[in-house]
Amino acid sequence: MEKKKIISGALALVSLLLLLGSSLAYAEFTPPLASASDYVNIDVGEVHEMLEKNPEQIILLDVRTEGEYAAEYIPGAINIPKDVLKNRLDELDSSKMIIVYCKSGVRSRTASETLAQHDFDVYNMLGGINAWKGKKFATSTATPMQTEKPTETPLPSVSPALTPEEKKRVPGFEVTFTFAAVSLIVWCLLKRRNIF
């Protein structure tokens, strides 16, 4: 009889730990529900149009390193590297639209998420400065790119990696959660029938 109690207790403990672990994994890795403070992905053509139509209502934010910014930048852009952005949010005018870019669009996506969480009106430029360099603008009032040295051939744009939702998803946790729930139900039924 003592052996049955030990097995019963171990089964209950394992089931509870699996349920708890699955719940914590779900809470930690499940993306938050969409809210009003999301950002919008736009391509370089849309960015160019916005800058042509309403430049005084836009902050063009380059989130690359200072060295990358010094080498080349889009005219009118200000530089706040992604790694220090949270500490420098007060430098940005929250009444203006903020268009964020980096080299290929990965860092700007993270920076856009940060800005959106602080209720800024944010647009993430897909493809970053690589995509900007590859685009020819017909009627531009400003030079499309400012560089220390002219670039002979444009660099290809880099596709964004995984979306934040894809990065946060934990494959297989559903199976663990289901196994834990079934184990707990079986234990309760066996306990009720005095098998354990």
Image (spheres, grey):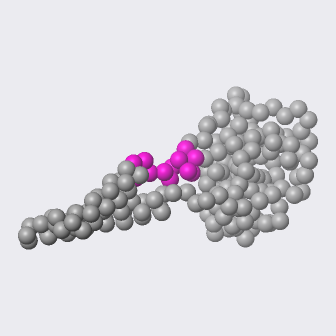
User: In the image, is residue 69 above or below residue 153?
Assistant: below
Q: Residue visible at 73% across and 70% down? A: 90
**Quarter of the rendering occupied by the N terminus:** bottom left
* Residue in view at x 72 percent, y 65 percent: 119
Q: Where does residue 126 sit, x and y in percent of width and height?
A: 69, 43
Image quadrant in which you'd find residue 177: bottom left
Image x and y of residue 169, in percent: 48, 51
| Residue at 40% in and 52% down | 173
Q: Above or below — where is 32 with respect to 75?
A: below
- Which percent across, then down, holds residue 112? 67, 56
Q: Which residues are magenta?
A: 162-173
Instruction: Give coordinates of residue 145: x percent, y percent.
Output: 78, 41
In the image, taking residue 37 as reference, residue 27 lies left or right, namely left
- Can you see residue 99? yes
Q: Count the marks.
A: 0
Residue 164 on the magenta span = yes
